[in-house]
Image (cartoon, helix red, strand yellow):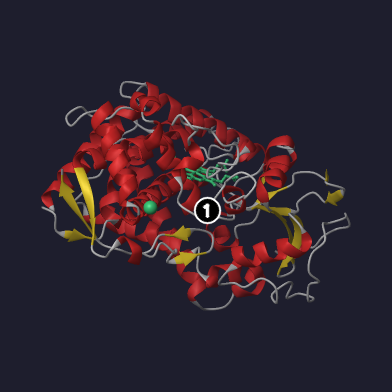
Amino acid sequence: AWKRMSKGGKLPPGPTPIPFLGNVLQVRTDATFQSFMKLKEKYGPVFTVYMGPRPVVILCGHEAVKEALVDRADEFSGRGELASIERNFQGHGVALANGERWRILRRFSLTILRDFGMGKRSIEERIQEEAGFLLVELRKTKGARIEPTFFLSRTVSNVISSVVFGSRFDYEDKQFLKLLQMINQSFIEMSTSWAQLYDMYSGIMQYLPGRHNRIYYLIEELKDFIASRVKINEASLDPQNPRDFIDCFLIKMHQDKNNPHTEFNLKNLVLTTLNLFFAGTETVSSTLRYGLLLMMKHPEVEAKIHEEIDQVIGPHRIPSVDDRAKMPYTDAVIHEIQRLTDIVPMGVPHNVIRDTHFRGYLLPKGTDVFPLLGSVLKDPKYFRYPDAFYPQHFLDEQGHFKKNEAFVPFSSGKRICLGEAMARMELFLYFTSILQNFSLRSLVPPADIDITPKVSGFGNIPPTYELCFMVR
Ligand code: HEM
Ligand code: ZN
């Protein structure tokens, strides 16, 4: 962070920073997003805060975020510093990379995700099969109360696992559960006020003991696991028959082995695989977990979904992606769940890749930018009741699905979520499969269900709760 002091330029206005400490007085580490929303009242939708010594340009609301990420897509396509995990990634892996490295890894990752989706077996079939296994597990609970976190993450993770590792894990696999617990915990740790504080003062805190170091060790352990899978793949590699993402990457590594500058190296392999495995697991399963809670808070919505499922799919047929177009209400509810739960409220940090003129300011090359996705998803110009759960946000008067350009849970522009297509398929198929077979029973009355996140920082972590799955 030290090297990122503003070099000239003309940054947007913002609160006066204290030397070195930055805007510690204005940005509460336990409520970063809310602090930014307060500053927006005073400084408008584009302002500068100093996260410690580092200036960051904050973008609020649909217009400002779109103007940057979409209209000026190239300039704003850099990845900014995500201090809490920088020690683990050091600019490697598709999600944290920049420049040529990022372009190569992103193109490669998208190609492989698409190929394994169109090959012998489509991703859709893989999700349908995996959802079937989940239903079996849920039936086994016989309506007893359960905490749903790992029921959901095991099944969701198996979809991306099939792509990157070539096979699913058994639900009883102890190592699998441990990996998922570490991913779950990492997402929480990245969202605590310790992580936000670290984001400001990593320059010194990286040398100090404390809770902020937990995330480092968690991610290192996940890296070790991936590295061990890479070794297993390497030992049994058949270049004519790649089995998964790791095989395809290894083949590229062998082809490029005489090029010392290649981006197809072990570090990028391990860290890109970890990006996909992590992002492919925790985001979708957190969204489902939050979504089920919202259904119990709004039983009238769950009832309408049951009705639409019964009409369009019936009780026996397995839901397919083609059903979505005939199920506008369910589609709208899933959009509204993603909008309101706002899993990544401050987005992932961006960075301008050259000196950039923006709204009369000049952002010097290398300036970090936070596109506050949560402020877009709750932009009052685009959503009638920004803080309410209101599926009609995505329905017209005739009950048809209605798009909304401020729906950006996956962000937008050149860095838009690489797994969006897979994630949207999973959300629809899991959601409809679960509700086709079960109704949800809450242990507390709807009015008493608190939907405030358990932790809010980098992520909005859903509250912990229990429920019963009652066979319909
Ligand atoms: C990036 C959201 C599912 C892989 C992102 C970003 C967001 C996001 C907000 C940052 C975009 C930016 O930099 O502006 C979500 C949500 C998901 C989801 C809400 C589910 C509900 C997935 C899945 C995968 C995935 C299933 C894997 C298949 C990635 C990767 C990146 C990314 C690799 C980094 C892209 C880059 O830096 O070029 N996602 N994601 N995500 N996501 Fe997702
Ligand atoms: Zn309601």
The residue at the point 35 percent across, 29 percent down is 123
Q: Is residue 299 above or below residue 165?
A: below
- Residue 387 at what x, y percent from top left? 52, 56
Quarter of the image for residue 90 reads: bottom right
Q: Is residue 369 above or below residue 218?
A: above
- The C terminus, quarter of image: top left
- The N terminus, quarter of image: bottom right
* Residue at the front extreme of this rendering: 397
- Residue 410 at what x, y percent from top left? 53, 42
Quarter of the image for residue 21 reads: bottom right
Q: Nearer the viewer, residue 99 or 311?
A: 311
On the rendered structure, is 103 left or right of 162?
right
Visible in this render: residue 394? Answer: yes
Tell me the SS state at disc 1.
loop
The residue at the point 66 percent across, 63 percent down is 36
On the rendered structure, is 470 left or right of 122?
left
Looking at mark 1, is its residue's CB closer than 8 Å to ligand 1? yes
Q: Nearer the viewer, residue 249 or 281?
A: 281
Q: Which residue lies under the disc numbered 1?
A: 344
- The image shows a total of numbered marks equal to 1
The residue at the point 51 percent across, 28 percent down is 255
- Residue 172 at what x, y percent from top left? 18, 52
- Residue 267 at what x, y percent from top left? 51, 47
Q: Amino acid at mark 1?
A: Val
Q: Nearer the viewer, residue 443 or 260?
A: 443
Visible in this render: residue 239? Answer: no
Is the residue marked by circle 1 packed among few (<14), some (14-19), or many (20+) residues within 10 Å? Answer: many
